[in-house]
Image (spheres, rainbow, N blue to C red):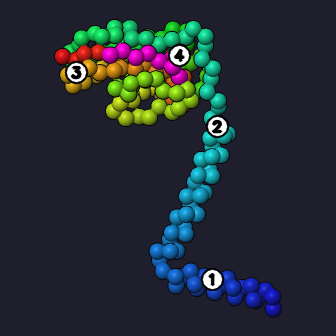
């Protein structure tokens, strides 16, 4: 008798759910799915991602072929230098390794540990490239090199270098 009553409650809930309108039923489904997804993402982050590796003392990045205040014409060739830390394609997170990023008119380095976005102002060189060519409108522009680990997390201001160039 108790079991039957329980079964009746389930059927009734199902009936109510079906009758309560498609909108509210699907909203409930969506919320449940989203909760699941974020839960999985949290799990992945804690299990798969290592801490940001330490920055080797004395390591630095620099523009090899451009000086601060240089006057240039588009397309602008940019050679990215590094010393005291090695270049490795994105993917592996290993102390002593990372890859270059070029930030255009962002102004400054990114806080250590912050993931560098991918957009027109944040270029990744995740294959380990050390040079590129960009086109910029005439005027003054701030170029910033920012080295980051295999998960694109900024190594902070020590591994960053900014220059201002004047594009004719
Ligand atoms: Cu990157």
In the image, taking residue 50 as reference, residue 133 lies left or right, namely left
Q: CA distance from mark 3 to mark 2?
A: 44 Å
The quadrant the C terminus occupies is top left
In the image, taking residue 39 as reference, residue 161 lies left or right, namely left
The residue at the point 56 percent across, 61 percent down is: 33
What residue sits right under mark 2 in the picture? 48
The answer to whether the residues at label 3 and label 2 have Cβ atoms under 8 Å apart is no
The earlier-in-sequence mark between 1 and 3 is 1
> Residue 163 location in percent, x, y?
36, 15
Q: Residue 163 lies in magenta, yes or no?
A: yes
The residue at the point 56 percent across, 80 percent down is: 17
Q: CA distance from mark 2 to mark 1?
A: 40 Å
What residue sits right under mark 4 in the picture? 158
What residue sits right under mark 3 in the picture? 139
The earlier-in-sequence mark between 4 and 1 is 1
The label shown at residue 150 is none
The label shown at residue 13 is 1
Using the rendered view, name the quadrant where residue 91 is placed: top right
């Amino acid at each position: 008798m108790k079991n039957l009553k329980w079964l009746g409650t389930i059927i009734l809930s199902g009936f109510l759910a079906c009758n309560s309108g498609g909108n509210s039923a699907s909203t409930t489904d969506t919320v449940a799915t989203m909760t699941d997804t974020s839960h999985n993402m949290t799990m992945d982050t804690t299990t798969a991602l290592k801490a940001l590796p330490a920055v080797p003392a004395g390591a630095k990045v620099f523009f090899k072929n451009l000086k601060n205040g240089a006057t240039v014409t588009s397309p602008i060739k940019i050679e990215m230098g590094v010393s005291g830390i090695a270049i490795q394609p994105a993917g592996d997170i290993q102390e002593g390794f990372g890859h270059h990023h070029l930030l255009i008119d962002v102004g400054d380095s990114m806080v250590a540990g912050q993931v560098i976005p991918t957009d027109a102002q944040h270029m990744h060189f995740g294959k380990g490239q050390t040079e590129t060519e960009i086109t910029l409108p005439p005027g003054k522009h701030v170029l910033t090199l920012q080295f980051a680990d295999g998960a694109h997390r900024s190594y902070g201001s020590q591994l960053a270098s900014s220059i201002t160039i004047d594009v004719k």
